[in-house]
Amino acid sequence: MKRKSLFTIWAIALMFVLSLSVLTACNKNKHEFSSEWKFDETNHWHECTTKEHTDTTEKLPHEFTWTVKTPAGVHTDKVEKGVCECGYETERTISGTATHTYGEEWKKDATGHWHESTCDATAPAHDVMKSDFAAHTFDEGVVTKPADYGVVGEKKFTCTVCGYEKTESIDALGAKDNEIVLVAGETLGKEYDGEVISITKDGFVIEGNRAPTIMFKAKGADENTYTATAPKKAGEYTVKVSVEATAEWKAATKTFDFAITPMVIGVDWEHPYDNSNILTGEPAELLAGDEATITVTMESANVGAAVQSFEITGKDAGNYSLARADVNVAIIKADIEGFTISNAAAFEKGFYVGATNLPDPTTNYVEIGTGYGEKTIVWEQELEGGVWSRNLTKEEVIQLKTGTFRVHIKYAEGANYNFGDAFVKFTMKAKPRKISVWNFDGKMYDGKQVTNFTFNDLVNKFGATVIDGVENFTSATESGEKYVEFREVGGEWGRNLNVANVLTNAGEYEYRIGVTATDEWEAVVSEVKTFTIKPYEFVLELGYGQNQNNPSYDRGKTFFLRVFYRANGNELIEGQKIELWLDNEKAGLETREGNNGVYNFVPDRKKIVTADCFFLKIGNITNPVMENYKIVTKSPSVTTVEITVVEHSTTQKSTSGPIQIVEAAEKRIYATVEKGYFKVGQTVILYNSAGTKVGEATITEISAGGTTSPSGFAIPSDGRVIIVLDKIFNDILSGKIVAK
């Protein structure tokens, strides 16, 4: 006893010291409460605005001023709106206020009589509505059948209000008394289980051994409330067991009291902190279809608070029993829910390297109650393998190059809340730049590679794109590897970074220039442009002379015509010999077979053939690219070429007949061909009419029939020619010319 008293004194002293400490702290940091009301569904209060405190005023229940929102109508109850001074609003429905109209005729059954609604009584809003319900008021009754020995009599009773009639039996004279008792060991009550209680005739001993009528009512209720429906809800009840009279036994009635006791339940909750000390929920053991709510009031809203009180409410609350010892409720730390980055869109678009406009994250999250941990902003970079870096500052992020980052708003674990984290990912993108390319002129195939095909030769404009809020750390034009890439139209791109001479063969090409990406700058590529390396064009002359002894080794199918040279005597394309051949299967010049299967042309023949009868060979290159060469005519309108076959002679020199006309100014003579042939490029000796040699000249042009000879040959079958020389001499009229 003494020891207990000492402990009590010590506790009081400790509380006094703590009170002084709190008082000192409060005096040092005086509470200042906001004039703005805070509220929930039950209470309202003011919150402290002092930086060092998060206290509130005493939470008080709402006091509502009620006004009619919806008046009562037919089948519709009145609805009222309640407004508290704190601004919280609610509604309530006043049941039983709906209006109805009722008929004057009495409706009745065994339980009583009433007036029934006539205003659409079957409306979905309610069952059939009854008014003026009352139990029957019976008269003294009239014997309709007198009792006698062995005869049960009858007596009729009539309600004096509605006229309802009932009949009761009159015990037969000499009938024995009947007795109704419970079967030995039988009990009538039970604990609530959601099922109707089962009380049958098997639970009773009846001497008359007649089937009884079993009726139920609430204990203490009026006699006229008996019903055949057995109860199932918790409560105290009376059961009436009755048997009718028989010729041998009197009628008997006996009542028994019983109870359906509430189901014993418990509460075992862990409720996350929500700044409320009033917790509600359904019992875990609640039976299907039942409605009940448990409300537990804690000593405070904070984690660790003890239970202060509890109650169970709802339509079926009376069916359940809850003891203090069975209430085990704890407020636990809550997760921070609905916590997001409100300006996430500003991050999700990404930023460019060097961006100085990187914002801090914000959140619209509204803190509920108290007990949060420290709130911080944390920056991170994603490393290889999906690992995140150490915590960075915003300044460090700005200085970093391209990559993926995330920024957090974090709450540390606090007294009432767990750790909270809201974040948004964003990228630091390389800075954009732009580039354009010059037009590159093509050429005709010449067996040599394209020159001046480098980045520096082709670049037009190259530089950075100006972006607000971005600093350029290095030059856009000095970052990355510069390259040229090209392809045949429709082909694959081929890249050549530094070599100037890259293309040779004829074709249609596309090209572009670009610079590879760096950690700071985006890759950039120019628009695509085109150029052409045209095939070398071999122009067909107007005609070709062919010696009759020119052989064919494929039975006259093809004939070699000549190798062609430039005017200065060099080959047309350096290192290449271009041979002109005739496809005689197409041309159709007459041939004849010689020795050893060799074919020759038939002499003194000429023929006009189409340009497609000719083809080229590259005489000294293995597997040449023939697409580099093309046969064309002198003009698009000229589509044919003349082939002339001349007779081969090894002993007689070609000789003209007498010269008929001399046009000295044009270096032109008119003559005939007596033997052999003359051709362009041939050297001839000129003689006068006395047969004296006067000089030598070279034939530059031969005409026949008024037009220049397509083949460049005098035509033997015709004979009459006009020959143009490179020089002319006097005194040659009536002379002649002879091939040298």
Image (cartoon, rainbow, N blue to C red):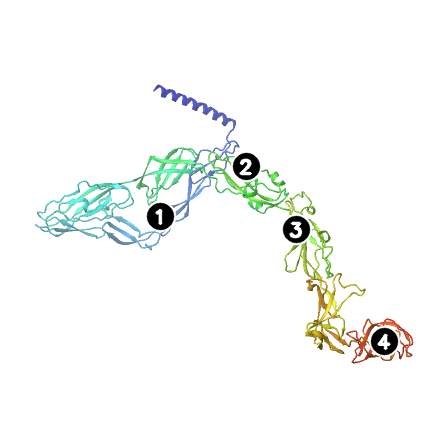
Vertical arrangement, residue 309 with respect to residue 679, above or below? above
Instruction: Please give the residue where the numbered disc 4 appears in the rendered image.
Output: 738
Above/below status of 37 relative to 715:
above
Q: Decide if residue 343 is in sight here.
A: no
Mark 1 and mark 2: span between their CA atoms?
57 Å
Q: In terms of sequence position, does the residue under pointer 3 or pointer 2 come before the other?
A: 2
Residue at point 38% right, 46% down?
A: 93
Where residue 714 sits: x, y (%)? 80, 76
Say which of marks 4 and 1 sits in front.
4
Q: Amino acid at mark 1?
A: Thr
Q: Please state which amino acid type lies under the numbered disc 3.
A: Val
- Indicate which disc, 4 or 3, sits on the residue closer to the N terminus: 3
Work out whether residue 508 or residue 158 is closer to the camera in this orientation and state it.
508
Query: Which x, y percent locates residue 210?
Result: 15, 48
Q: Which residue position is annotated with label 3?
A: 524
Residue picked out by circle 1: 97
Who comes first in sequence, dot 1 or dot 3? 1
Question: Residue flagged by tag 4: what amino acid is it?
Answer: Val
Q: Secondary structure at mark 2?
A: strand
Q: Residues within 10 Å of mark 1 (few under 14, many from 20)?
A: some
> Could you tell me if the residues under marks 3 and 2 are in contact, i.e. CB atoms within 8 Å?
no
Residue type, label 2: Thr
Q: Residues within 10 Å of mark 4 (few under 14, many from 20)?
A: some
How many numbered discs, if any? 4
Residue closest to the eye, 44 or 611: 611
